[in-house]
């Protein structure tokens, strides 16, 4: 039985990758902001339409460096409907996450943010979930009114554009993940995009142990992207438009089969240039007749791997003194009923039909 996984990393042609890493044998420059790293950085800056970008070893440490560079200490209003990384970065920074519920598009509900602001609040950390974006205009207004920083976890939003602008131009800093499972990858990797150029030096320090020449300027981590990862990025970026278009075709095929089915809610569409990062389906057990976990079992039995993403909520982390999930009932309901179906470039029509047949049966 052919297995269908939930993601399938894009692989550039083997010869293309070999060509890209050849120069490393001449330069013997393996890491620490080498020429391939710099080349990828320039290409991504153009592709993403951002004024400033720095590359990192992964998205998580990039987010940690963002919080560090902004000097945040206090409460950060954020969403529980995300990957562990978002909250972990807040806690690692010595800050306190304050959970705000989400709305139908799975992103933070901006209408509930202001009620959570206290005199300790320093920032809002939103997540662009499944490639759908937060209400960046409303969040910007709230932040300006209360003098808060805005950070976005844009790990799902590579290449997304809103009002003709790169999504990572909104807020103070946006984090991208280039993990192997994402729309664009460098095996492991990440980036920060930001508007204020004066952050560049702070981010560079944070990424390299806080060391500047002979001085130990501050406490920092090690989060540099190596040359082999950057080379993978250059190859993948060459094919990215084709990659996203192919995901879009799979997305449309799913829509054709699953829209209008009683008890199934598909990803609400937004007025953005989409990247087709994920295909979440929300099941209403009462109306659909089966719950999410029963659907997973049926798919698994046929060798198909779907993912409970995001489950559990990050506010269920056992590191907290109590379970915080009841503070955000909508996010809790979504996390118990949502399922991400397999989605990647070149997922065949046959496979999509097979998956939909099992779900609808
Ligand atoms: C993938 C992901 C991250 C972490 O990125 P890494 O590059 O794996 O460290 C953070 N947040 C979200 C929402 C993600 O999906």
Image (cartoon, grey):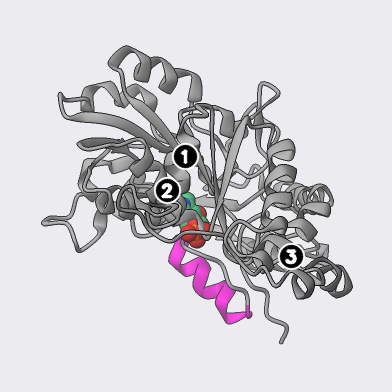
User: Which element carries disc 3, helix, strand or loop?
Assistant: loop
Q: Residues within 10 Å of mark 3 (few under 14, many from 20)?
A: many
Q: Is residue 68 visible?
A: yes
Quadrant of the rendered image containing residue 109: top left
The reply, left or right, for residue 281 in relation to residue 234 is left
Q: On screen, 219 above or below 197?
A: below
Mark 2 near mark 3, Cβ–Cβ under 8 Å? no
Q: CA distance from mark 2 to mark 3?
A: 32 Å
- Tag nearer the camera, 2 or 3: 2
Residue 158 is situated, as x and y percent measured from the top left of the image, at 63, 45
Residue 90 is situated, as x and y percent measured from the top left of the image, at 30, 47
Residue 298 magenta-drawn?
yes
Q: CA distance from mark 3 to mark 1?
A: 33 Å
Mark 1 near mark 2, Cβ–Cβ under 8 Å? yes
Q: Residue at x 70, y 33 (%)?
A: 273
Pick the quarter of the image with the N terminus.
bottom right
Q: Main secondary structure of the magenta part?
A: helix
Mark 3 near mark 1, Cβ–Cβ under 8 Å? no
Which comes sooner in the sequence, label 2 or label 3?
A: 3
Q: Residue at x 43, y 56 (%)?
A: 61
Q: Which residue is mark 3?
A: 10
Quadrant of the rendered image containing residue 47: top right
Q: On screen, 308 above or below 280?
A: below
- Tag nearer the camera, 3 or 1: 1
Q: Which residue is mark 2?
A: 205
Residue bounds of the magenta highlight: 292-303
């Amino acid at each position: 039985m052919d297995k269908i996984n939930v993601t399938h990393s894009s692989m550039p042609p083997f010869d293309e990758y070999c060509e890209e890493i050849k120069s490393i044998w001449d330069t013997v420059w393996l890491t620490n902001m080498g020429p391939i790293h710099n080349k990828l950085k320039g290409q991504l800056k153009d592709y993403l339409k951002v004024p400033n970008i720095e590359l990192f070893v992964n998205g998580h440490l990039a987010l940690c460096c963002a919080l560090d560079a902004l000097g945040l200490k206090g409460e950060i209003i954020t969403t529980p409907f995300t990957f562990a990384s978002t909250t972990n970065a807040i806690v690692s920074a010595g800050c306190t996450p304050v959970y705000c519920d989400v709305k139908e598009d799975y992103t933070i509900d901006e209408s509930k943010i202001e009620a959570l602001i206290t005199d300790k609040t320093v920032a809002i950390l939103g997540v662009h979930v499944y490639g759908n974006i937060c209400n960046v205009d409303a969040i910007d207004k709230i932040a300006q009114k209360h003098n808060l920083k805005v950070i976005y976890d844009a790990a799902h939003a590579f290449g997304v554009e809103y009002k003709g602008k790169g999504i990572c131009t909104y807020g103070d800093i946006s984090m991208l993940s280039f993990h192997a499972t994402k729309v664009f990858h460098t095996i492991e990797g990440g980036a920060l995009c930001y508007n204020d150029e004066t952050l560049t030096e702070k981010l560079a320090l944070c990424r390299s142990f806080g060391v500047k020449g002979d001085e130990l300027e501050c406490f920092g981590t090690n989060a540099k992207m190596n040359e082999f990862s950057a080379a993978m990025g250059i190859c993948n970026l060459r094919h990215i438009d084709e990659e996203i278009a192919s995901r879009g075709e799979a997305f449309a095929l799913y829509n054709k089969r699953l829209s209008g089915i009683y008890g199934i809610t598909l990803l609400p569409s937004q007025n953005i240039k989409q990247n087709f990062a994920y295909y979440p389906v929300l099941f209403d057990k009462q109306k659909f007749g089966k719950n999410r976990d029963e659907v997973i079992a049926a798919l698994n039995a046929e060798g198909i791997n779907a993912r409970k993403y995001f489950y559990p909520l990050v506010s269920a982390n056992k590191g907290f003194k109590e379970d915080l999930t009841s503070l955000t009932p909508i996010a809790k309901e979504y996390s118990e009923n949502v399922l991400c179906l397999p989605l990647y470039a070149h997922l065949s029509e046959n496979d999509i039909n097979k998956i939909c047949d099992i779900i609808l049966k």
